[in-house]
Image (tube, rainbow, N blue to C red):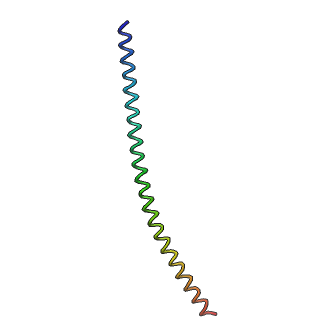
Amino acid sequence: MKFKYIIGGISVLIIMLVSSFISYLDYQRDISNYQHLKHELESLKKDKVEYEGLKDELNKLVGEINSINELISEKTN
């Protein structure tokens, strides 16, 4: 009879160990995903800053082109 309790106790311990190991693996995966997403966010922030700079330059160029078009239209009229 005691043998059944010992086998049952060992089975419960094995199940708990396997469950803990799976939880640990999930935790490690979550940490890895967080680090990857954090890196992606930093990259997107850098891209946004670069985009804003390019947008400003493009707006300046559009303004210059509009000025040139106005001068051309004045000369042709």
Q: Residue at x 50, y 74 (%)?
A: 58
Q: Please tell me which residue is depicted at 39% across the width and 15% down the height of the picture.
A: 8
Q: Quadrant of residue 16?
A: top left
Expressed as whole percent of the image width and height from the top left, the position of residue 15 reads 40, 23
- Quadrant housing the N terminus: top left
| Residue, far top | 1
In this rendering, would 3 be left or right of 57? left
Question: For residue 30, which quarter of the picture?
Answer: top left
The residue located at (40%, 28%) in the rendering is 19
| Residue name at image x 36 percent, y 8 percent | 2
| x then y, percent, for residue 35 | 39, 48
Residue 65 position within the rendered picture, expressed as x and y whole percent measured from the top left: 54, 82
Vertical order, 14 against 47 (above or below): above
Image spot of residue 73 (x, y percent): 61, 89
Count of numbered tags: 0
Q: Is residue 52 above or below residue 1?
A: below
- For the C terminus, the image quarter is bottom right
Say above or below: 29 vs 64: above
Q: Residue furthest right?
A: 77
Rendering quarter of residue 7? top left
Q: Is residue 19 left or right of residue 69?
A: left
